Amino acid sequence: MATNQKGGPPLKAVEWVYETLGIGTELVNIEQLAGGTSSHLSDIRYKTGNVDRACVLRLFTKAEWLAMEPDLADHEAASLLEAAKTGLAVPGMLAFDANGEQCGVPAVLMTKIAGSVVLQPDNEDEWLEGLAAALAKIHSHGAAGFQWEYFSYNQARSLERPAWSDHPAEWMQAFSIARGARPSVESCFLHRDFHPANVLWEGKKVSGVVDWVNACRGPAGVDVGHCRLNLAQLYGTETADRFLEAYMRHADGFSYRAYWDILALTDILDGPPMVYPGWETFGMTGLTDELIRQRLDAYLLSLLGRFELEST
């Protein structure tokens, strides 16, 4: 058994991991991984013979999420197998406990890939190019037959006038656009939560993409918009725009439509915007809730401007 279980999973889950990894496995160390905000992630170090190895255990512990999507473990397991077809380095699926019969809660066991999250790059242009190239590679995979399809998390019709914003009328305009007809585009494989904290780096190169539980088939603009939204909050609209330019250099046949950015923006609203805890975990300091609100307002205005230009 493991010599250290700092922030580790319940013993029942550890026993399942041990059985899954097989005879001759020695669990050496188990620690909680940083960055997990909606599930429990454990870094598990083990030996097979004299070979040091590592894997990651995800326990789906958020009851509200499971109530909405009870197939989360099955979904992530299938997503990892599909993501491996993109040619990117992604965690390999080792085993999953769909209903929590073995671990107490639904779980996925996967290989650990090398690299670390970078939120303060030395060269932002190179960093944005790397992000864009990785996302374009995901979208180049059609994923025909993948059973999970894109759906919006929020219903624009139910969103209320944002009292926290200096531009509530413009937000209502965005809600109206999001309720409108969607552009007709071909579906491709989506990560569905692609942003800088889910991309790993070694040196100046992307070493892998993680957190595939939301993967689905849908419009590429959904992923582009979600990443741009995160970049706008982290660094401002100008950085989000530079990412779009980089993505368009890497993605053959992509036709930008502001609709998808606006939909991605309305999709994350759940009360007044706040700093995402994962950003602070990975060393991004200096962000405040007020700054995030100001940046979202500025980003909104830029998107409405783009939409109006497209409509003329």
Image (spheres, rainbow, N blue to C red):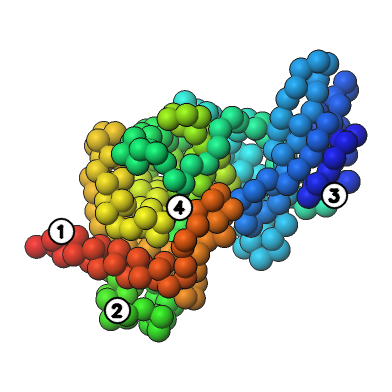
Image quarter for residue 304?
Answer: bottom left
Q: Which numbered disc flags the more N-terminal residue, 4 or 3?
A: 3
Toward the viewer: 302 or 28?
28
Q: Amino acid at mark 1?
A: Glu
Q: Are marks 4 and 1 in contact (CB under 8 Å)?
A: no
- Residue where numbered disc 1 is placed: 310
- Residue where numbered disc 2 is placed: 167
Query: How far apart in space, not on screen, are marks 4 and 2 (Cα)?
Result: 29 Å
Crowding near pointer 1: few (<14 within 10 Å), some, many (20+)? few
Query: How far apart in space, not on screen, are marks 2 and 1 (Cα)?
Result: 22 Å
Residue 15 in sight: yes
**Which circle, 4 or 1, is nearer the viewer?**
1
| Badge 3 element | loop
**Which circle, 2 or 1, is nearer the viewer?**
2
Taking the image as shown, residue 98 lies to the left or right of residue 233, namely right
Q: Which numbered disc flags the more N-terminal residue, 4 or 2?
A: 4
Query: How far apart in space, not on screen, are marks 4 and 1 (Cα)?
Result: 24 Å
Q: Quick check: 57 above or below 20?
A: below
**Which circle, 4 or 3, is nearer the viewer?**
3
- Residue where numbered disc 4 is placed: 150
Q: Quick check: 298 above or below 114?
A: below
**Which circle, 4 or 2, is nearer the viewer?**
2
| Badge 2 element | loop
